[in-house]
Amino acid sequence: MTVYMADVAGGLVRSEQRRSAGLYARGLLQAGTRKSLEPMVARLGEDGDYESLQHFLADSPWDATVILRAVAERVVPVIGVQGWVIDDTGVPKDGRHSPGVKRQYSGTLGKIGNCQIAVSVHAVGERGTVPLDWALYLPEDWCADPERRRKAKIPEDVVFATKPQLAATLIERAAGWKVARAPILGDEAYGKNIELRTRLDDGGLEYVLSLNSDASVYDDDTVFGVPERGERSRGPAPSAPVAERPPCQVRDLAASLGEEHFQTLAFRTRDDQELVSRFAMVRVIAAHPVDRERRPPREEWLIIEWPEGHQAPSDYWISNLPADTPPERLARLARLRWVIELDYRQLKGELGLDHYEGRSYLGFHHHCAIVTAAHGFLTLERLDPNRQRSA
């Protein structure tokens, strides 16, 4: 672990930062139910210095991205990456002083509760997963409160951003690293966001994102044309395409499909389990970008999962993968994002992702970076054929 941390923390400017990164990672990896700073320092023994590690986390101006990028560039090549998953997780918190904390809905809690929410991007592959980057979601009332910002040490250039906007920024940053790109996967909260899908496609990034059943689409054979200018109309001539017929909701489109559109597909999960379900893959054009944003029509895949014997489809996805993508790959990617639940189990249960008790915005991101480094170390250890296993 010492050699590994020296490598991934090698980009930090100061020697005391590199030393503290190694100590903090060691504390996270040591046995113990609580991975907050005080009990970790106690377990580190004579190497533990509370004030030094507290400064390293909360105040030292090192860039968490330096470590995150180093971990990604070391771990991603060995896991056989298949997709990048965007997600968010809730961190329960008492009080109101930790950055971003408020009563808000958390999928982790399954309800509204007092919590922070962290948006993340993970690379998932045949042999493991690794978080790529993290961003703490700051609600609008936090961003607009100068006193709370000052106390939580939130940088002046941090402004309000929605979770999909944060996710897009993380993806674009990681796309500039020396790691393999892969289709972006995410749940409905991200899939229904038109801005995110447009931003990814404009950036040349592929995606397979869950979609809400009432999303509107056009059939791929819909004819679009630019209306003629009226004789008495003023102003510029029309230039945006208009469809010959109205769009339909994806649930209605699914209901209109015949049996010939569906096929039973078998595909293997990362843990080599075989899953079988019934899918339809049809080409569609999302209505919102055409109707509301006046963008040119763009064909995409609508993926419909309708298990045998069910009264209605169970899930929908939209994807900008090429038109010749095999159905098996579309189905596998659609189902792949749930793999990161294994990430969260280890990140939270074993490595203390949600144990950070400080009230520093910078400290939260520093903690996430070292937790990611510890997670990457465990992944590499598991995959190392030369590692000595206990009898």
Image (tube, rainbow, N blue to C red):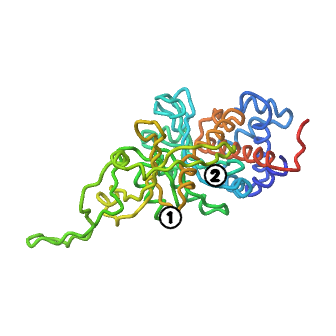
Between 54 and 264, the one nearer to me in the picture: 264
CA–CA distance between discs 2 and 1? 21 Å
Of the pair 55 and 38, the residue shown nearer to us: 38
Q: How many neighbours does mark 2 have within 10 angstroms: few (below 14), some (14-19), or many (20 or more)? A: many
Q: Residue furthest left?
A: 232
* Of residues 281 and 100, the one drawn nearer to the viewer in this rendering: 281
Q: Is residue 44 above or below residue 268?
A: above
Measured from the top left, where is residue 71 in percent x and y?
71, 53
Q: Is residue 303 left or right of residue 221?
A: right
Q: Position of residue 135 (x, y in %)?
A: 56, 47
Between residue 82 and residue 381, name the one nearer to us: 82
Which label's residue is closer to the chain start, 2 or 1?
A: 2
As shown in the figure, which amino acid type bears the numbered disc 1?
Pro
Residue 364 shows in this picture? yes
Q: Position of residue 366 (x, y in %)?
A: 66, 45
Rendered residue at 73%/55% (across/down):
12
Residue highlighted by disc 2:
123
Q: Say whether residue 290 is left or right of residue 354.
A: left
Mark 1 surroundings within 10 Å by alpha-carbon count, few (fewer than 14), some (14 through 19), many (20 or more): few
Of all residues, the one furthest to the front in this rendering is 260
Q: Amino acid at mark 2?
A: Ala
Query: Which quadrant is the C terminus positioned in?
Result: top right
Q: Which residue is mark 1?
A: 322
| Residue ID at (46%, 64%) | 202
Say what secondary structure mark 2 lies in: strand
